[in-house]
Image: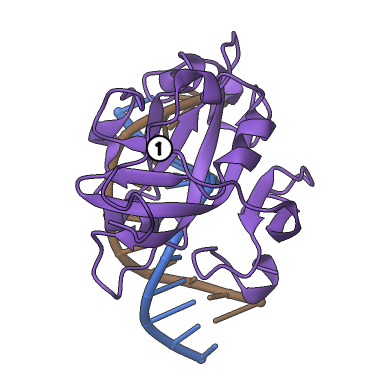
Chain colours: A purple, B blue, C brown
Amino acid sequence: MTTGPRSGAASRRLPRSFFARPTLVVARDLLGKVLTYDGKAARLVEVEAYIGAEPASHARSGPTARNYPMFGPPGFTYVYRIYGMYDCLNLATEPKGFGAAILVRGAEPVAGFNERARLAGPGLLCAAFGITTALTNVDLTRGPVAVRDAPQVPARLVGRSARIGVGDGKLFRFYVRGSSGVSGPAAARA
DNA sequence: TGCCCGATTAACT
DNA sequence: GTTAATCGGGCAA
């Protein structure tokens, strides 16, 4: 996999307790962690938080056949299809009576991808991984999709901004400054 | 049952 | 900056 003293040993999955915290804290801490699925691995560099019944969230109208993982236990996936053609991966957070999840928007390839793989953008990331809505509501602590521990990104490299494609001014987007795995124009990566 | 539109992306002008 | 691709969810009727 990666180089380093224990390169062969796969790092451990993040435990349920990692996700069972306030969503904004989980979002910030997810930067630098490694998403794995189907022999592929990528370092997370851009995420967005969606918390409760705010208008921008799929949870705004309460639980439905699509969004129910947002209302379920922390540490499960929520995958939805957007514009009829792209899938987006979310990670449910917080033990709760309201819907909350983190949208995985960008990552840097670590292993298992071809050289041209592009993971900057939620639709592209899922397409590169092969993640589809069939993988919604799977347990990150036991299922085929996992998030593995890795060193925290230093605060000086963490950017925060409004969410992409969301009109409100909430600073719920977190990203790694300067990373090629961050979506959007250059200004959104600085 | 129909209509509108979206947590997107790429390919235009 | 604008628009097409493409379709299921949510709400009005």
Q: Would you say residue A85 is visible in this rendering?
A: no
Residue bearing the label numbered 1 = A147
Q: Would you say residue A36 is visible in this rendering?
A: yes
Q: Amino acid at mark 1?
A: Val
x, y (%) of residue C1? 66, 77
x, y (%) of residue A5? 38, 54
> On the picture, is A11 further left or further right than A45?
left
Front residue of C2 and A55: A55
**What's the residue at 46%, 63% (across, down)?**
A120
**What's the residue at 31%, 68% (across, down)?**
A117
x, y (%) of residue B4? 52, 44
Toward which corner of the image does residue A139 lie, by quadrant?
top left
Quick check: A141 above or below A45?
above
* Quadrant that contains the N terminus of chain A: bottom left
Q: Residues within 10 Å of mark 1 (few under 14, many from 20)?
A: many
Front residue of A101 and A165: A101
Instruction: Assign a secondary structure to mark 1.
Output: strand
Looking at the image, the residue that sits furthest to the front is A5
> On the picture, is A63 further left or further right than A148?
right
